Image: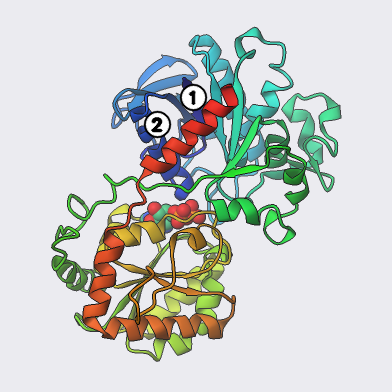
Amino acid sequence: MRVAFCSSEIAPFAKTGGLGDVCGTLPLALEKLKIEPVLVLPRYQMIDPQKYQLKKISPEAWIGTAGQNIPVYFIEQEGYFGRKEIYGEDGGEYSDNLERFHCFCLKALELFKTQKKTMDIIHVHDWQAALIPVLLKSIFRSDLFYKKTKSILSIHNMAFQGIFPKDQFPKLGFDRRLFSMNGLEFYNQINLLKGGLIFSDRVATVSPHYAREIRTPEFGCGLEGVLANRREGVVGILNGLDYETWNPEADVHIKHRYSKDNWKSKFENKSYLQKLVGLPVKRNVPILAFVGRLTYQKGIELLMKAMDKVLALDLQLVFLGVGEPKYEQPLRRLAKKNPAKIAVSLKFSEELAHQIYAGSDLFLMPSVFEPCGLSQMISFRYGTIPLVYRTGGLADTVFPFDPATGEGTGFIFDQYKEDAFLKSLQEALLAYQDRPSFERLMTKVMNSDFSWERSAKEYQKLYLSLLN
Ligand code: ADP
């Protein structure tokens, strides 16, 4: 069975968040199940052909490999992808993103044809690739090459839909009738994700909890009705983690390696982190970390609201993230004002991220909504205990710790309010003080299994159900 993955991000080539991780690692697990994945993404400027030993196969495409033997195609289009960033610069989106990702979708389908690679399934990810199912059922409808090809759309985040002004519709080259309620129209604008949701053969998302949530007005972002119209509903499959990249035993980015059976060098990573980010080296003061996009979704507003009370506690905070200037500036100011308590790195750094997961005690993830979330699973892997809001994939992966019984894996608050967050934080700090019990918790979370194996089998089942 041959399955194409079409995505705007595929790690390690291009990544801004979880989408890149998933599209870079799920195919590796599928390859082990004897599925034949083929990956496609744009050749952005940051993807150095030499570094990845890419070969140019035509003026419009390069080829490289991933995993054992997975072909990775890169769509070359200098005018659209030869830019500094993936989606936009200086906090704004590129104004021609509709054309850029329409071009990506069209060129991907043309490429499979010229390469004579028939696909059993084309698995597309998020709005940037969502035009592929639409193209398959319109422009390519009577193309014999795609006669048997099925499509699946995975939603990694319902909040990003690819919405553009309606006057740009002619740029897509579709019949005008496709700009309608049963097509790409959404409140008099173009909505690419909606097109994908209507025209793909199956819709999947990245956790069972989120699959239920997005069918409600609270989380559906206006598309809950479209999902309700799909007979087979939405399949929720929990993302896995690449246990090779995220492995404290073999992590090249961390100072001191450690394993779940002998994790004492986690403390050495803690001191190293404190020095690295300029915090006082104190072994018994808990480090609470945040690694993620600095956006509303990730709960920055709640953290800022509670910040005075948080900083009054005996703890240290480490932030790593890039995002909206309205969150970056106050964080920078806070760090300047409280250099002994809070360290802020406003950049994207894979290396520092690894060191933070390894050197921290607790991981803050108060996301307002979270389709799956990888950071909490990465934290588990490094014996760092997450504190999360009960939503989406966080609700599927983190269970409340009960110090009396030792059950549970983290700290969770149920009401999205400052008080509830602070109460949960107090519980976490109290638990941290009880060293034997907290260390048992650390060992337990390091033993949990969020590798891709199980989830990859669920994707295999989904693919087979579609082909039969
Ligand atoms: P999302 O996909 O919504 O951004 P996830 O939790 O699914 O969130 O995945 C985030 C991934 O991106 C994790 O691997 C996290 O470590 C990484 N990440 C986020 N921000 C940064 C950053 N500034 N530097 C390094 N890695 C980051």
Residue at 44% x, 72% y: name it. Answer: 400
Q: Relative to 79, say whether 63 is above or below.
A: above
Mark before the other along the chain sequence, 1 or 2: 1
Q: Is mark 1 within 8 Å of ligand 1?
A: no
Q: Find residue 3 and name its label.
A: 1
Decide which of 313, 425 is in the foreground and name it: 425
Residue at 52% x, 26% y: name it. Answer: 464
Amino acid type shown at disc 2? Leu
Q: Relative to 307, say whether 345 is above or below.
A: above
The structure's colour scheme is rainbow
The quadrant of the image that shows the C terminus is top right
Residue bearing mark 2: 30
Q: How packed is label 2: few (under 14 Cα within 10 Å), some, or many (20 or more)?
A: many
Give the secondary structure at mark 1.
Answer: strand
Decide which of 394, 191 is in the foreground and name it: 394
Q: Position of residue 286 (x, y in %)?
A: 29, 80
| 451 horizontally vs 303: left or right | left
Q: Position of residue 30 (x, y in %)?
A: 40, 31
Q: Is mark 2 within 8 Å of ligand 1?
A: no
Q: Relative to 166, say whether 427 is above or below.
A: below
